[in-house]
Image (tube, rainbow, N blue to C red):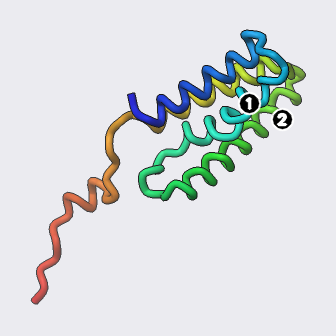
Amino acid sequence: MTVRALILLALAGAAIAADYAGAPAEMLPLLALPFLLVAPGLAWLSRSDELDIAASAAVAVGLSLAIETAIGVLLLACGLWSLQVGLGVLLAVTVAGLFCTGSGRKRNSASSVEQSAEPLATK
């Protein structure tokens, strides 16, 4: 399991505990906000190894806010808005992002076509 997956698991566990386990009201922001600000974007961030920490954090927060806005608008448009449904959909989207981008294999910067092409001989 990668470090990114462990971070997402810890953040998701805290958010689930805040929402479904009935945590005290004073603890809800401390448990849910880190997940809401970082987790969905971090799960969908595919090339984090090419960015420094500050850029990765900025992109993860931006992606998270965009994903949450899209889910919220979709739930409102369908008339299905509730906190539990929204968090469930957000968790599903986060897990989907982790599976789609976190396969554990390193990506090469050059495509297979570029790697198989032979260099041109100079005359």
- The circle drawn on residue 120 is none
63 sits left or right of 80 in the view: left
14 in relation to 108, above or below: above
55 in relation to 2, above or below: below
Image quadrant assignment for residue 104: top left
Q: Amino acid at mark 1?
A: Leu
Image quadrant assignment for residue 54: bottom right
Q: Which residue is mark 2?
A: 73
Q: Residues within 10 Å of mark 2 (few under 14, many from 20)?
A: few
**Which residue is depicted at the point 78% across and 11% down?**
22
Which label's residue is closer to the chain start, 2 or 1? 1
108 sits left or right of 3 in the view: left
Query: Where's residue 64, x and y in %?
Result: 68, 41
**Which residue is depicted at the point 47% across and 50% down?**
48
Q: Residues within 10 Å of mark 1 (few under 14, many from 20)?
A: few
Depth check, front residue: 23 or 71 = 23
| Tag 2 secondary structure | helix
For the residues bearing labels 2 and 1, Cβ distance under 8 angstroms: no
Query: Where's residue 92, x and y in %?
Result: 62, 23
Image quadrant assignment for residue 43: top right
Q: Nearer the viewer, mark 2 or mark 1?
A: 1
**Which residue is depicted at the point 49% across and 58% down?**
52
Query: Where's residue 3, x and y in %?
Result: 43, 35
- Which quadrant: the C terminus? bottom left
**Which residue is depicted at the point 40% across and 33% down?**
2
109 sits left or right of 33 in the view: left
Q: Which residue is mark 1?
A: 30
- Which quadrant: the N terminus? top left
| Tag 1 secondary structure | helix
Query: Where's residue 71, x and y in %?
Result: 76, 32
Q: Amino acid at mark 2?
A: Val
36 in relation to 114, above or below: above
